[in-house]
Image (cartoon, rainbow, N blue to C red):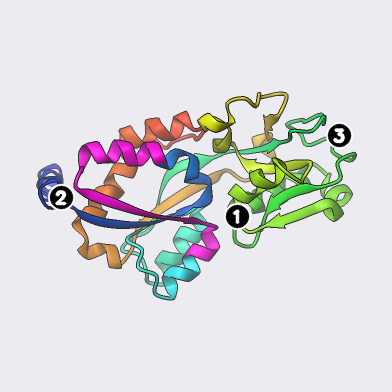
C-alpha cells in the first residue's frame, strides 16, 4: 500500500510540479548539484530552492519562521532538536555519514593522527557550537592530545565550507568535510599530499539526519524529495562524495 501511495504521489508531482525549500548543512554543498540533477529526472517540474549553512543556524532560522520543507542536518543532534521542539513531523533518520579531513596547500606534513602540526601558524575550524564538523574537529584534536598545543592558532569560521576557503587562502591547514575533496574543482589536490582523512577513531561518527518539517507536511513535492534523499539513487551520489551511507 505504501508503495502504491508513493507512486500516486510521484505521479501528482510529475504532472503539477511546484517548489521544495530545502535547508541543508554546508558540507552537502558539493553533492547537491548532482542530487538535484538526479531528482529532476524523477520530478522534472519541481524546483528545489536550496539554502546551505551551519546546522545550528539553520535550526534557529526554521524555529523563527523560515519556510523550510526539508531539513538536512550535519548531525543527528540538530535534526533531533528541530523534532523535539515541534517543528518536524517525525524523528530524524540518517541519510549519510560524514567524514572529516585536514587540507593544506602549504608544504606541511599531514597525518591522520593529527601529529606534527605544531609548526603551522593557523588552523581553520568551523564553529563547534553550530557546525557539527567543527565539533568533530575539536574532539579529534583533544583525543589526539594536540588541542592544547594548537588552540591559540585556531581560526573559527561560521560553517564548514568556509574552512576550505580559508585553507585555500590564508590558513595553513583547514579541517574540512571530506566531501569537498570529491568535487571536480578540487581534483588537482591529492590525498596524502594536500589532504588526509582524519582517523575516525578520534571523533564521534558524524551521522547526518533528515526531517520533513511541519511546513512540508502539506507539500507533496517535499514528501517525494524526502523519500528521494533516502533512496538508493541518492545513496550512490553521497558515496561518490566520500560519505558512508546507511543500509
Nearer to the camera, 80 or 121: 121
Q: Kindly identify which residue carries mark 2.
A: 13
Quadrant, the C terminus: top left
Tell me where the magenta segment starts and ends, as one range. Answer: 33-58
Q: Is residue 80 visible?
A: yes
> Which dot marks residue 116?
3
Nearer to the camera, 11 or 37: 37
Nearer to the camera, 59 or 139: 59
Q: Residue at 73%, 35% (x, y): give it.
A: 104
Give above or below for 81 relative to 151. Answer: below
First in sequence: mark 1 or mark 2? 2
Image position of 222 (left or right of 67)? left
Residue 165 drawn in magenta: no
Callout 1–callout 3 Cβ contact below 8 Å: no
Image position of 202 (left or right of 83)? right
Image position of 231 (left or right of 71)? left
User: What secondary structure is marked by label 3?
Assistant: loop
Residue 114 location in percent, x, y? 78, 37
Residue 38 drawn in magenta: yes
Q: Kindly identify which residue carries mark 1.
A: 159
Residue 92 location, quadrant: bottom left
User: What secondary structure is marked by label 1?
Assistant: loop
First in sequence: mark 1 or mark 3? 3
Which circle, 1 or 3, is nearer the viewer?
Answer: 1
First in sequence: mark 3 or mark 2? 2
Nearer to the camera, 175 or 144: 175
Q: CA distance from mark 1 to mark 3?
A: 25 Å
Q: CA distance from mark 1 to mark 2?
A: 33 Å
Q: CA distance from mark 3 to mark 2?
A: 54 Å
Amino acid at each position: 500500500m505504501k508503495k502504491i501511495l508513493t507512486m500516486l504521489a510521484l505521479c501528482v508531482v510529475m504532472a503539477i510540479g511546484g517548489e521544495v525549500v530545502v535547508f541543508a548543512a554546508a558540507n552537502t554543498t558539493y553533492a547537491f548539484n548532482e542530487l538535484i540533477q538526479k531528482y529532476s529526472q524523477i520530478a522534472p517540474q519541481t524546483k528545489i530552492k536550496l539554502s546551505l549553512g551551519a546546522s545550528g543556524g539553520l535550526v534557529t532560522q526554521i524555529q523563527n519562521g523560515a519556510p523550510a520543507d526539508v531539513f538536512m542536518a550535519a548531525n543527528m543532534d540538530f535534526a533531533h532538536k528541530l523534532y523535539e521542539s515541534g517543528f518536524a513531523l517525525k524523528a530524524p533518520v540518517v541519510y549519510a555519514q560524514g567524514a572529516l579531513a585536514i587540507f593544506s596547500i602549504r608544504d606541511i606534513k599531514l597525518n591522520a593522527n593529527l601529529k606534527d602540526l605544531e609548526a603551522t601558524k593557523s588552523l581553520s575550524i568551523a564553529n563547534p557550537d553550530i557546525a557539527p564538523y567543527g565539533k568533530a574537529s575539536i574532539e579529534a584534536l583533544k583525543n589526539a592530545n594536540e588541542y592544547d598545543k594548537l588552540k591559540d592558532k585556531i581560526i573559527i569560521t561560521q560553517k564548514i565550507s568556509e574552512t576550505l576557503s580559508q585553507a585555500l587562502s590564508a590558513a595553513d591547514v583547514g579541517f574540512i568535510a571530506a566531501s569537498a575533496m570529491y568535487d571536480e574543482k578540487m581534483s588537482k589536490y591529492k590525498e596524502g599530499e594536500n589532504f588526509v582523512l582524519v582517523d575516525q577513531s578520534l571523533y564521534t561518527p558524524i551521522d547526518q539526519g533528515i526531517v520533513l518539517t511541519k511546513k512540508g507536511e502539506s507539500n507533496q513535492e517535499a514528501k517525494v524529495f524526502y523519500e528521494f534523499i533516502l533512496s538508493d539513487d541518492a545513496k550512490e551520489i553521497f558515496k561518490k562524495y566520500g560519505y558512508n551511507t546507511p543500509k
